[in-house]
Structure formats: C-alpha cells, structure tokens
Amino acid sequence: DAKTTQPNSMESNEEEPVHLPCNHSTISGTDYIHWYRQLPSQGPEYVIHGLTSNVNNRMASLAIAEDRKSSTLILHRATLRDAAVYYCILYNQGGKLIFGQGTELSVKP
Amino acid sequence: KAGVTQTPRYLIKTRGQQVTLSCSPISGHRSVSWYQQTPGQGLQFLFEYFSETQRNKGNFPGRFSGRQFSNSRSEMNVSTLELGDSALYLCASSLAGLGANYGYTFGSGTRLTVV
C-alpha cells in the first residue's frame, strides 16, 4: 500500500489560510489523493479528493504537484471549528482507506 | 439526506462474549467499509463489502467477521471478545464501488468496551 507522510502537528491563527502538506512519493498512476478530517469524538469527515488537477470545493482546495509526489490541502480561512486531525490518503479501489497518523491542526483565536 | 447510521452508539460486553454491530449506509451507496480506532493503533481497516460480497479484508483475526444484506445494510460480528477489542468501530459508505472517484461518508461509530 502506498504511504503518505504528514507533519504531526501544525498551528494556525483564526481567519488565516492554512496549508497542510502531504508527501506521497510512491503514488501510482491510478491512486487518488483523498483528504479526511476527524474532529474530537466524531467519525472522520470527507474533505476533498483529486487525481491530477487541482480541485476546489466549499470546504477546501487541493493543490497537487505536477509529478503527483506531493499535495497540499488549503483551508482558505481557518475557523476554530477546523481544529481537527487531517488525514491524507492514497486511495485506489476496494474500499480500503489506509489512515496514517495525520496532522493535528490547532487554531488559535 | 440521512447519513450513515450506526447502532448501538455504546456497548459494554464481558470477555468471551460476542457482539454484533449494525450499519445503515446512505441510500444508494453499495460499498460499506468497517474500521477500528484505538488510541494506540489509530484507524485500521477491517473489511469492505460491495453488493453483498466482501471485496477486501484487513489484518484482523477470524474472530472479526461481517456481512452485507441486499439492502446494503451491514453488520460486523466479533466473537470471543478480548479486552484489546475495546475500541471505536466506524462504518463508512460510498458510491466507490463504481470506481475510486468517490469519497466515503463515515458514521459516528459504536464505542465498544470489553470488561
């Protein structure tokens, strides 16, 4: 299973943008890059995913490097409710999401 | 639209007993996956079902089993419970059986405590 590498923790100030990096040097051509987040005492929540092109949705943006060996999740204006553990996952098929340790994001008011 | 529903939310069992957890996916989703979350091991994949067939299985002992019904609802069963089975069990559903270009929606989980 292809692996991802993320920083253990990051801090942000409220209402500022946050860039969460993820390295996935062993990504294969058919792997999608998925991001999920988990708030305390809740199940993970889908954030965004992409294959090759940058993606935007109402929650975040996903910037994918041209060689696909890294990606960045961008929260445009962090709020206190964005404090969570963010997981970057390579997903191919078969329903198997491999969760690493993720990045714990804290947001300061 | 209704999300992924897991029942029960909390459960306390004694070592050696067995337990069955239930998951109702989002309407139209035919892929259902199960995960175990513990403080020490994090989120670990148990198995995935699509159209009543198990397509993928994680590295868990045979005491952990599951099934999916024709309406896509799924159950997982753990037999001969051990203290180490205490965890949050999460279910997720998706249209992903049609390809990898879909995200998964998770339920709130069942908190199992084995005493």
Image (spheres, grey):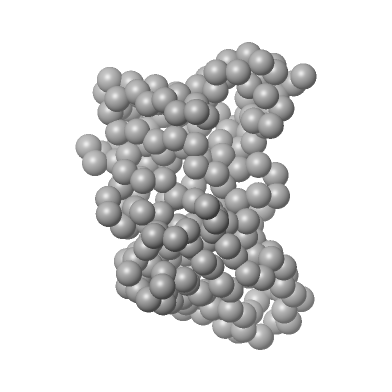
Which residue of the protein is positioned furthest toward the top in this rendering? A16
User: In this orientation, does residue A21 appear?
Assistant: no
Q: State the image quarter where residue B33 is shown.
A: bottom left
Q: Is residue B64 left or right of residue B58?
A: right
Which residue of the protein is positioned furthest toward the left in this rendering? A29
Work out whether A38 lies above or below B33. above
At 72% from the left and 79% from the top, the residue drawn is: B13
At 50% from the left and 42% from the top, the residue drawn is: A46
Which residue of the protein is positioned furthest toward the front in this rendering? B1
Q: Is residue B4 left or right of residue A57?
A: right
Quarter placement of the C terminus of chain A: top right
At 62% from the left and 84% from the top, the residue drawn is: B18
Q: Is residue B83 left or right of residue B25?
A: right
At 71% from the left and 27% from the top, the residue drawn is: A80
Work out whether B84 lies above or below B16. above
The x and y percentages for residue A18 are 57, 19
The x and y percentages for residue B69 are 41, 77
The x and y percentages for residue A40 are 70, 44
Return the residue nearer the eye: B5 or A9: B5
User: In this orientation, does residue B81 appear?
Assistant: yes
Return the residue nearer the eye: A5 or A85: A85
Tally of numbered discs: 0
Return the residue nearer the eye: A27 or B66: B66
